Image (cartoon, rainbow, N blue to C red):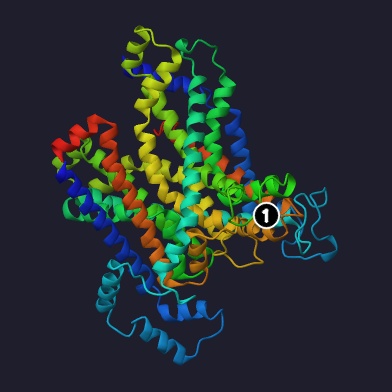
Amino acid sequence: MSAVDTADIASAARTRKRYAPGLVLSAAVLVLILTAAIAPGLFTRQDPLAADPIHRLEPPSRAHLFGTDELGRDLYCRVLHGAALSLSTAGIALAIGLLCGTLLGLIAGTARGRVDDLLMRATDVLLAIPSLLVSLAVVTALGFGATKTAVAVGVTGIASFARITRAEVLRVSVAPYVEAAHVVGVRRPTVLMRHVLPNAWAPVLGFAAVSFGASLLAVSTLGFLGYGTPPPTPEWGSLVASGRSYFAEAWWLSTLPGLTIVATVLAANRIARALHGEDGRLPR
Amino acid sequence: MTRYLLRRLLHAAFALWAAFTASFGLLYLLPADPVSVMALGGAGGGVPSAAQVAALRRAYGFDRPVPEQYLSRLTAALHGDFGNSVQTGQSVTRLIADALPQTLQLAAAALLLALVGALIVSLATVRTLPLPWLRHAPVPWLGRALRSLPALGVSAPSFWVGLMLIQLFSFRWRLFPAVGDDGLSGLVLPALTLALPTGAILAQVLTRSLVTALGEPYIQTALAAGSGPGRILFRQALRNASIAPLTVAGLLVGELLAGAVTVETVFSRTGIGRATATAVSTQDIPAVQGLVVFGALVFTLVSLALDLLVPLLDPRIAATAGGSR
């Protein structure tokens, strides 16, 4: 009876409509930003690096949607041109975490015993250090730059992906069809690739979708702290940082690039939640 | 219980050792030439002379074999010595000790704000649920708005939130100072910024466990016994729902420390976070290692304390912990 009640409350707490207006808006925002990342020229004809000292620190207007910065560069144009770098860095970081984590999780889940213990203790340690500190240590060792920040953020995702993959592999390995495959004499690697992996994929990919927003936030934070691509190349985090010096007189400088980050992360999270199922299960 | 305690202590010691080893491998072994990295960072971009590099190499023991370096660094670390900062020449332990009070103050204020904020948001969210005994019409749009608040909180980068607060409260309304670390008024904006992501996660966890608790049979029992809504919400539901959020709050203390890196940079405060940002910018390897191990130490100590505290709060866990572990 208690289980029924919980389910009732939980379902009432959820929005019933599957295609809520928020979801449509999120999709639109994401499509726009992805288009800007691939072809910024579609939205603006200006050069993100062209200085125009006469029009420096101008507030947002029709000519300059996001205003201009201290060198007279068009901020809207710089944000659009920064999309490619920010999104691809976040994507690479996510891919690193996903690939390494899934591989380790597969090994731990199939090897069991000592190897499993060792790998899980290793993920414990990785999870015991706040992820930003891990990223900063990696940045210190590797140096600064977009690819290096991607690696630094990617490393922090490995532990979670490894754990989820391992749990899924363990869950799927006891399924009747896997045991049946073993019994009829299918070789172990084949069982793993044909039967275990395809059925363990979904939650891992769901988590990857949920992680994209966090990955973009982490990458932007490293950019803001100044460990990403050096100026003048536009990147969202460093755009917010460079606006700080003139922030008292020009509110739009840090505000609008930051709002772009918020909008992208919100949209990505909303879509991930729709894909992932609100309660962590994938809709079938 | 003693065995449980011993096991937990061993786990904590292992985690710290592993954090030290991992950071040693990453910071001292991974860079092809850590000395020139440090020398470049320390000399402010100028190319160091061969003699300078050789002197540094000797001073940091890089001329010795790796196992020997590792062992001597490990014994030193066990004595609380992480070497000297390349940048300032000061001992890293001293650096952390000097910066700690400011950050502790900030983190404590932020944790308090996060807990209070999460409590208010979750209770308000639960009040909008269609529960007949709450004796008021459910307000769906308000519930939806309240439920989307935490999602908004985790989606906003804290460096940007801090700048927005500065723009509004310092530049526009001149209520709080924009930068600096003196006094209570200087603490308000940074603490709010640091509290936001933590509070958002806490609110999500607390709302979820409140919803679960409200579906339990003991709520029906309390209703049948004639308890009022307030009593049920606070005495039955909230008390039972508070274990998970408390554990999460403990785990988030480490994140507060990491969040201090951006918050202290945005608000130009001194502290552990600022020290970390400076150490990374100058690629000050001993300082970064000390700070990373310190982060792991804080996290380990807090989760150790939680493991000992939670059985006190929830007798059911004490029973299983004493019995099976």
Up the image or down, B179 lies above or below A49; here it is above
Residue B171: x and y in percent read 72, 49
**Quadrant in the picture for the C terminus of chain B:** top left
**Quadrant in the picture for the N terminus of chain B:** top left
The residue depicted at 34 percent of the width and 26 percent of the height is B240
Is any part of residue A274 visible from this angle?
Answer: no
The residue depicted at 39 percent of the width and 57 percent of the height is B295
Q: Residue under label 1, please give it.
A: A79
* Res B315 quadrant in image: top left
Residue found farthest to the right: A54
Q: Number of numbered discs present?
A: 1
* Res B141 quadrant in image: top right
Chain letter for mark 1, please: A
Q: Secondary structure at mark 1?
A: helix
* Res B93 quadrant in image: bottom left
Residue found farthest to the bottom: B51
Residue B107: x and y in percent read 47, 49
Is any part of residue B140 visible from this angle?
Answer: yes
Residue found farthest to the front: B183
The residue depicted at 27 percent of the width and 82 percent of the height is B65
Does residue B67 appear to the left or right of A264 in the view shown? left
Identify which residue, B107 or A142, lies in the foreground: B107
Residue A283: x and y in percent read 42, 30
Name the kind of residue labelled 1 in the image: Val
Up the image or down, B196 lies above or below A114; here it is above
Up the image or down, A152 lies above or below B113; here it is below
Identify which residue, B312 or B281, lies in the foreground: B312
- Label 1 packing within 10 angstroms: few (<14), some (14-19), many (20+): many
